[in-house]
């Protein structure tokens, strides 16, 4: 039988979702976990990379990105900063209803040329995790001037390490240099404390988290799929990655948000 490729992809995706949901339900049998899911604010941290018309899984098209931003605004989501997330989870401030973070990793030039105008149009705040050794060096990445302009318009700049290595493969002194030198360079160029980190490639372990904590980071974001709430570890904050989808982009976007039962319980998605 000749099965078209697209159908095979759909079958594969459905299988992955069924396995994923099965895993989630088997994990949530524990009463403490169910209680933790039910209590306190849930914060979705979206994770983008590129906003461009490229055939690249990490590149969301500007049209799709705009539709997603409009959906967040129409749904009453309020964009917050990493500092507000931290203060909110510590009980120092009250978070707004439906708080979300829009984050970008790597600092690609299209964040400035394509995403920034859309964020400004919808009056949304966002956070970009920057690789300072690439800033004002490689043409595909933003410049310090662009970062400063964005920071005066609702964008927060944080660290994505100095050179984007696989941290778990480095000796301790190099992990420390990556985390500390990126923080120092960003602080010197932007003139404010840099206290949040996104682990390159999302990989981390307790040891790396301990070093980050030692040099005064307040928290770090992973690519562990899920929502952030009071049960989250500040050095292993969950995110929801958003990828390029050629067709039915909003359907895919809703499904990514709705994947976990708690999103629906929280009223993010109306069926
Ligand atoms: Zn990265």
Image (cartoon, rainbow, N blue to C red):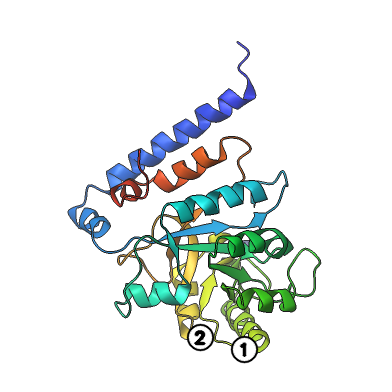
Disc number placed over residue 252 in the picture, else none: none
**Disc 1: CA contacts within 10 A as few (<14), some (14-19) or many (>=20):** few
The answer to whether residue 213 is seen in the rendering is: yes
Q: Which residue is drawn at 53% across and 29% down?
A: 10
In the rendered image of this protein, does residue 149 appear above or below residue 238? below
Residue 22 located left or right of residue 252: left
Could you tell me residue 130's position as x and y percent? 64, 71
Q: Does any atom of ligand 1 lie closer than 8 Å to the CB of label 1?
A: no
Q: Where's ligand 1: which quadrant? A: bottom right
Residue for point 28% across, 48% down: 265
Judge by depth and name the residue closer to the eye, 135 or 154.
Answer: 154
* Residue 271: percent from left, percent from top: 35, 38
Residue identified by numbered label 2: 215
Say above or below: 31 vs 233: above
Q: Nearer the viewer, residue 137 or 208?
A: 137
Tell whether 134 sits left or right of 22: right
- Percent position of residue 146, x then y: 72, 74
Residue at image point 78% right, 75% down: 136
Of 226 and 176, the residue lying toward us? 226
- Pointer 1 residue: 191
Instruction: Estimate the spatial distance between the alpha carbons at disc 2 and disc 1, rounded to whole Å.
Output: 18 Å
Q: How many marks?
A: 2
Query: In screen coordinates, is 173 left or right of 14?
Result: right
Q: Nearer the viewer, mark 2 or mark 1?
A: 1
**Residue, far left:** 31
Whether the residue under disc 2 has CB within 8 Å of ligand 1: no
Where 60 falls versus 107 (above or below)? above
| SS at badge 2 | loop
For this orientation, the residue located farthest to the top is 1
Do labels 2 and 1 touch, CB within 8 Å? no
Relative to residue 34, is residue 252 depicted above or below?
Answer: above
| Residue 219 is at least partly visible in this image | no
């Amino acid at each position: 039988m000749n099965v078209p490729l697209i159908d095979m992809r759909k079958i594969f995706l459905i299988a992955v979702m069924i396995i994923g949901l099965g895993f989630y339900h088997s994990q949530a049998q524990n009463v403490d976990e169910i209680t933790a899911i039910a209590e306190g604010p849930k914060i979705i941290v979206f994770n983008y990379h590129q906003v461009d018309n490229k055939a690249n899984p990490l590149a969301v098209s500007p049209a799709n990105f705009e539709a997603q931003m409009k959906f967040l605004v129409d749904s009453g989501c309020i964009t917050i900063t990493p500092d507000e997330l931290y203060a909110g989870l510590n009980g120092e401030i009250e978070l707004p209803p439906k708080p979300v973070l829009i984050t970008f990793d790597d600092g690609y030039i299209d964040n400035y040329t394509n995403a920034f105008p859309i964020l400004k149009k919808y009056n949304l705040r966002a956070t970009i995790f920057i690789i300072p050794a690439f800033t004002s060096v490689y043409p595909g990445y933003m410049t310090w001037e662009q970062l400063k302009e964005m920071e005066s318009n609702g964008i927060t700049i944080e660290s994505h390490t100095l050179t984007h290595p696989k941290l778990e493969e480095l000796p301790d002194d190099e992990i420390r240099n990556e985390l500390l030198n990126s923080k120092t360079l960003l602080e010197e160029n932007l003139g404010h404390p840099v206290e949040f980190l996104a682990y390159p490639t999302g990989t981390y372990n307790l040891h790396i988290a301990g070093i980050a904590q030692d040099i005064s980071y307040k928290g770090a974001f992973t690519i562990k799929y899920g929502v952030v709430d009071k049960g989250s570890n500040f050095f292993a904050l969950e995110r929801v990655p958003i990828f390029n989808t050629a067709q039915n982009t909003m359907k895919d976007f809703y499904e990514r948000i709705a994947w976990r039962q708690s999103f629906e319980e929280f009223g993010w998605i109306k069926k």
